[in-house]
Image (spheres, rainbow, N blue to C red):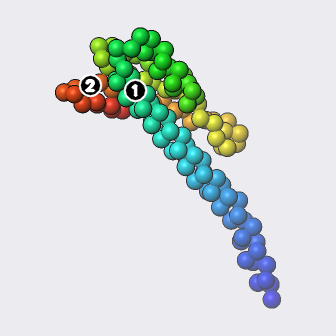
Amino acid sequence: MGNKGQTLVIFVLILPILLLLFALIWEVGNLQITVNKYETEIKDTIEYGLNNLDQENLKENLTNLLKANIDGDITIEINNGVIKINVKQKYKTLYNKLFNSSFDLDITYSGYIENDKMIIKKE
């Protein structure tokens, strides 16, 4: 006779854990989407820079191109035909309010031309 409420009690106890799990999955997915977006923008910018190495104000143009598409602290170095881009960003999440923390994105790519091929690699 007393078994009617047991399932409801178990559901109520497990529901917050399930909601936290779903929120974590959501945050990790959003973080991965953001990282992919940043990496794509950086690679596209390096490709543009390698195609226009002889352009005046190339560093300024590359910085403006990245700032138009992504946020964060952008560092660009151009030395001897090698373009190196570093982006640092604090990615705030839902858990930031709960645990007072954030993810630190630090993405660095470099690109150069070797044997008439563009080589862009992550560092």
Q: Tell whether 64 sits left or right of 110.
A: right
The residue under the point 47% across, 33% down is 41
The quarter of the picture where the C terminus appears is top left
Viewer-proximal residue, 93 or 52? 52
Q: Of the two numbered discs 1 and 2 on the same chain, state the one appearing first in sequence.
A: 1
Name the quadrant containing residue 100.
Answer: top right
Label 1 residue SS: helix
Disc 1 + disc 2, Cβ < 8 Å: no
The residue under the point 48% across, 18% down is 61
**Amino acid type assigned to the residue bearing label 1 in the image:** Tyr
Viewer-proximal residue, 23 or 10? 23
Residue 30 horizontal/vertical position (percent): 57, 46
Residue placed under numbered mark 1 in the picture: 48
Residue 57 horizontal/vertical position (percent): 45, 11
Q: Is residue 37 above or below residue 58?
A: below
Residue 34 horizontal/vertical position (percent): 54, 40
The total of numbered circles placed on residues is 2
Residue 1 horizontal/vertical position (percent): 80, 89
Task: Using a 10 Å C-alpha cutoff, classify the residue at mark 2 as few (fewer than 14 neighbours), some (14 to 19) or many (20 or more).
Answer: some
**Amino acid type assigned to the residue bearing label 2 in the image:** Ile
